[in-house]
Amino acid sequence: HLCGYLPAAKLNVVCVQPPNLIMVQLVGPLRKELADSLSSCRVLVVGAGGIGCELLKNLVLTGFKNIEVIDLDTIDVSNLNRQFLFQKNHVGKSKAQVAKESVLRFCPSANITAYHDSVMNPDYNVEFFRNFQLVMNALDNRAARNHVNRMCLAADIPLIESGTAGYLGQVTVIKKGMTECYECQPKPTQKTFPGCTIRNTPSEPIHCIVWAKYLFNQLFGEEDADQEVSPDTADPEAAWNPEETAARASASDQDGDIKRVSTKDWARSTGYDPVKLFNKLFKDDIMYLLTMDKLWKKRKAPVPLDWAEVHQLGRSQDDMCGAGLKDQQVLSVGGYSQLFQRSVETLRAQLKEKGDSAELVWDKDDPPAMDFVTAAANLRMHIFSMNMKSRFDVKSMAGNIIPAIATTNAVIAGLIVLEALKILNSDFQQCRTIFLNKQPNPRKKLLVPCALDRPNPNCYVCASKPEVTVKLCVHKTIVQTLQDKILKEKFGMVAPDVQIEDGKGTILISSEEGETEANNGKFLSDFGIRNGSRLQADDFLQDYTLLVNVLHCEELPRDVEFEVVGDAPEKAPPPSVPEEEKSITNGNKDSAQPSTSTKAEAEDDDILIVDSDEEPSSSTTDVSMETGSLKRKLQDAETGETASKRKRLDQQPAAEDDDDDDDIIALD
């Protein structure tokens, strides 16, 4: 793969701190023109974590001299097993700054600028991005990926997107007008569960883990009405009469006797007594659920736990079930009840130390918080007849993470540099989307390349005139919801300005502080917005304009505030006043070509595959939108089996070696 770049390549082993880290450097001159390009071009690396550390090392050893890196995070102990530029004495310091210092130790001639900041800060505007010849993403969240995608489109700068998820990875290239952008394919929102499932009828361990995280916030953190943990009496499936059946709930008349008040208020009134909390959550509330008869006609009913009985049982049995590392052991019910008691006592002390009205923030890397969620989730799993999970498993699910694999990051970072060499060598036609798989495909390949896809003409980001249709009730939707949940959360804007196309140019939302705050609590209908109305939303930081067609609907499904209609928006009736004949092409105003970015929706670090003669188009496969990346849909992440097949570029029938063994899942 390197033959075109290295006429006489050889390997040089470089050893750096820590002493057991071995780096293999390819040396032997690049072609002079390419070598000159590397030493003179400016590149931006966004993210200095798992992929970012590997990427920075690769860049300087390949010959890149002018590098700027930005990352908002600080170094955590959990980073040290794979982010090799950091050591124990760096914990708590800026990732970007320490990464710069570590790289300069083995490549002092490099010119590296580090920013300990968010890439979404308005200081990093389109003009900032235009200072670079190439941008490389090493991010771990969708919001930042969306933003960098739009900034690169606006600046017309090539972007290399990447991501990893466990042993899976992906790399892709995004170029305005030539490839799909990161947002060309719709991506699913993070999976959520109905409140009644979490509170009344959990059937999977994840339901219990979500409940336990909600419980932490209700007891120790910021209370959220959407995160209630007590039994849901409004559950439509129950269809019971609380007035008639509440009396049947034999609430404890001893420790844990409860009244239906705020969870936090009740906990405070008991002094956060672990025994009373235990009996309320795992005995009284469960007995209350049992009175909802209809819930248990087709389900196995939960079995309440009593502290005295469990505590006595815990003394008569070993707390550990099985051997192995501490975090990978599954405790007994007695063991988890004791862990619950210890964690509540620790968290209570932390609250007391912070003072009145203090709140704690749940963090998967905070041992007492993680102990509390592990214990509470497992006790609830036992009550609802599920197999309990180890602390390691609970942490993985509670943190929405897949354990990071250092070698996956290394492979992806290497592929990013290979794609960068192609771009700087003006060889864009050879760029590919590459997938790294967990298992070799039938052709014995772990890396599989796909041709880059053309822009999606209906993309609401990179199309020549982006627009969407949003179904909502104008009499129930307030301006604040339009701004925060629709424009910012759903469509990724940072600071939107919204104008109603009503012939008057009415300003609905302004990004200037204080200008339109009085509108926030008003309904859209208060401004004359109705079925067929059009709103023009502008984000000047992203140089991005979106037309929003309003489709009024009196009744939406339960707990649904709005819906985006289809990939290609339905056209609303033309506005009453003719629009100016102007192009609102996002990005460079000179170009009417669609702007693009990567199709990769890689959550952590997507990967590029350099394979064989088989180069399917990445769009010929089902795109998995969860964790947002260019990843192909896997029905089974372990086996890689799926029904979809990739097409060859030459349109030959898909052979059995085209199975989606080569596909990968990206997590957001």
Image (tube, rainbow, N blue to C red):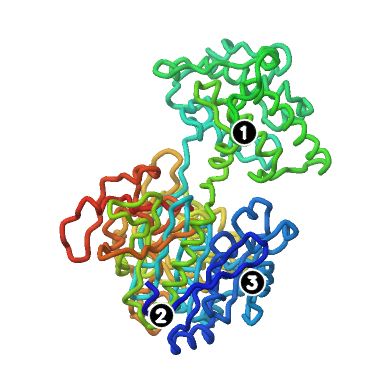
Question: Which residue corresponds to the image point at 62% horizontal and 26% vertical from the top-left?
Answer: 331
Counting residues from the start of the chain, the first of labels 1 and 3 encountered is 3
Relative to 573, is 215 above or below?
above
Question: Which residue corresponds to the image point at 38% horizontal and 70% vertical from the top-left?
Answer: 462
Question: Which circle, 1 or 2, is nearer the viewer?
Answer: 2
Q: Amino acid at mark 1?
A: Thr
Q: Quadrant of residue 214?
A: top right
Q: Position of residue 85 (x, y in %)?
A: 64, 64
For the N terminus, the quadrant is: bottom left
Which label sits on residue 103?
A: 3
User: The residue tagged with tag 1: helix, strand or loop?
Assistant: helix
Q: Nearer the viewer, residue 394 or 259?
A: 394
Q: Position of residue 339 (x, y in %)?
A: 69, 28
User: The residue tagged with tag 2: helix, strand or loop?
Assistant: loop
User: Alpha-carbon neighbours of circle 2 within 10 Å: few (<14), some, or many (≥20)?
Assistant: some
How many numbered marks does the figure carry? 3
Q: Quadrant of residue 341?
A: top right
Q: Position of residue 188 (x, y in %)?
A: 41, 50
Which label sits on residue 288?
A: none
Which label sits on residue 5?
A: 2
Q: CA gap, disc 1 to disc 2?
A: 52 Å
Q: CA gap, disc 1 to disc 3?
A: 38 Å
Give the residue at mark 1: 374
Q: Amino acid at mark 2?
A: Tyr
Q: Dots 3 and 2: beta carbons under 8 Å? A: no
Question: Which circle, 1 or 3, is nearer the viewer?
Answer: 3
